[in-house]
Image (spheres, rainbow, N blue to C red):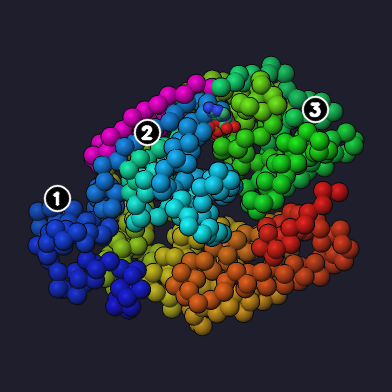
Amino acid sequence: MVSWLFRRRVLSPAVWGILQGKKDPSWLQLEQKTGCLNRVFVTVRQHTSTSRSNKFDVTDLTRPHTWYPTARRKSRKVVLHVGPTNSGKTHGALKQLQLSSSGIYCGPLRLLAWEVAKRLNKAKVPCDLITGQEKDEVEGAKHKSVTVEMADVTSEYHCAVIDEIQMLGCMTRGYSFTRALLGLAADELHLCGDAAAVPLVQELLKVTGDVVKVQYYDRLSPLVPLKVPLGPFKNIRTGDCIVAFSRYEIYKLKRYIEKDGKHLCSVVYGSLPPETRTRQATMFNDVNSEFDVLVSSDAIGMGLNLNISRIIFSTMKKFDGIEMRELIVPEIKQIAGRAGRYGSKYPVGEVTCIHADDLPLLHSSINAPSPILERAGLFPTFDLFFMYSRLRPGYGLQHIMEYFVENAKLSDNYFITDCENLLKIAAVLDHLPLSLHDKYLFCMSPTEMDDEIVSQGLTQFAQNYAERGIVHLREIFTPGMLQVPETHTKMKELESIHKVLDLYVWLSYRLEDAFPDRDMAASQREICSMLIEEFLERLGWQKPSHRKLLLRRSSMSQLSGEVQLNPR
Ligand SMILES: Nc1ncnc2c1ncn2[C@@H]1O[C@H](COP(=O)(O)OP(=O)(O)OP(=O)(O)O)[C@@H](O)[C@H]1O
């Protein structure tokens, strides 16, 4: 198994050597001189030098900057572009990216990655798009636009941009931003975001030898918090954007607003395919379209430029995957900051809430500074898990992860990101005859284990994969394989099936990397078409309008290649 992992380049030569008993720290020093540094090798050297013994402590995560030797070989020029929303931070950084001979943009959302790729390609700078769900390679491209999880920390770039850098502190995704921050091997690294991240970034980069410069920006157009709430829906006007936090609420608000026939609403939310979201946003931005109101999730909060005159919060609470909680200052400012964008139709933005009770929180947050970020997320790499598993051969991945969470040694600037969900996935996988690497890969997938249908979807895929290895997705996904709880509404069922499909696409890309001869894209299309038919039949939806509705609300439309959405 070890040699198989080594051949597949899952394990680095240094770890391979150590596990074979052929390598020791002096060999490692030699390897450094020959320039064959790699992530784990450096980790090992770090442990040997700090503990002054040859016994390395794999749970010592106090020097994560040493995991990225390609970046450490560079003296990076880091520019922090910070300021309030709508102050031109990203614009400044993207201009540099566009001018560079090679580069990478790392964003927090698929849509942002998609927009940047489009912008660069339009400016005749060929740019690949790589997200968890799509890989769009452009001939001759030396630029990439990616979601931050997909950032490649082994290639070298002239310029790199990380957007929304304050997400270093995110409980679940923080480690991906930390990885990009420490690991991108770029001559110039541009970081865009909230000033609250400045002290932490400066502290983290003290040990890397990078030169850090901070560039402050001011808001380009005013944002006015209104003293009165929206009140009844008849007060909605053209240019309004109502923000809600679930797909169910979004469609409910759309129905209410459209009921009296005065307005038509575009909708934007995170899991809509980028094309559909862009189409919805374009319809809203187009003065000649009938779609004059936007109903959106907080997916608009990050970086999107829309013709919004007034942001209206439908609630100031959201479910964050763990609990229902009040919105925090940075979230409120990010979302509110979408109103009155510079260069848009509305030179002054306004913000309010539907309910008067929510106004005090809005007003106190809008001009409050974001709390200073104190720690960045971190998560152990596969290599560390693997090395630990060699010391404890009987342990499953769940056990190993738990051990790391409890025993990892961290410096004060870091925290281990929340891995509740990962542990739940690992618990399922540990019953299956899968390699540790495959289990790790499944754990990193976008699987919400609290969603019963999604959890079934993952389990079935993993079982199939364990029993038969990779097969065409068409064979893995069979009609009726997912048991839908009786309490689920059709909408909820549809939402969960989206997530399963997104998950399968994600997995298929990862597995495709291991088995490059498979045509996953064709399988995805096949599955999606089949799924749509099966779904319509089961719901008893026979009319063409039903099909249109399903496609409109579903990421399946993009996957199946059927994106002919007719607004009415
Ligand atoms: N110098 C400029 N010339 C033309 N347009 C600009 C300039 N600076 C910013 N803009 C435009 O102003 C809008 C806001 O800029 P940008 O998205 O860079 O702001 P930001 O500070 O990154 O915003 P946020 O943090 O809210 O995402 C964008 O539409 C951008 O294209």
Crowding at dot 2, Cα within 10 Å, few <14 / some 14-19 / many 20+, comes out as some
Lateral position of residue 84 relative to residue 35, left or right: right
Q: CA distance from mark 1 to mark 2?
A: 31 Å
Q: Which residue is mark 3?
A: 237
Decide if ligand 1 comes within 8 Å of the CB at mark 1. no
Choose top left, top right, bottom left or bottom right for residue 405.
bottom left
Image coords of residue 39 (percent x, y): 27, 58
Comparing 79 with 222, the one in front is: 79
Disc number placed over residue 355 in the picture, else none = none
- Identify residue type, mark 3: Arg
Image coords of residue 209 (percent x, y): 23, 39
Instruction: Give the vertical position of 31 relative to 318 (above or below).
Output: below
Q: CA distance from mark 1 to mark 3?
A: 63 Å
Instruction: Give the vertical position of 317 relative to 50 (above or below).
Output: above
Quadrant where the N terminus sits is bottom left
- The residue stretch that appears in magenta: 194-219
Q: Which residue is the extreme one toward the bottom?
A: 468
- Secondary structure beneath dot 1 equals helix
Is label 1 or label 2 in front?
2
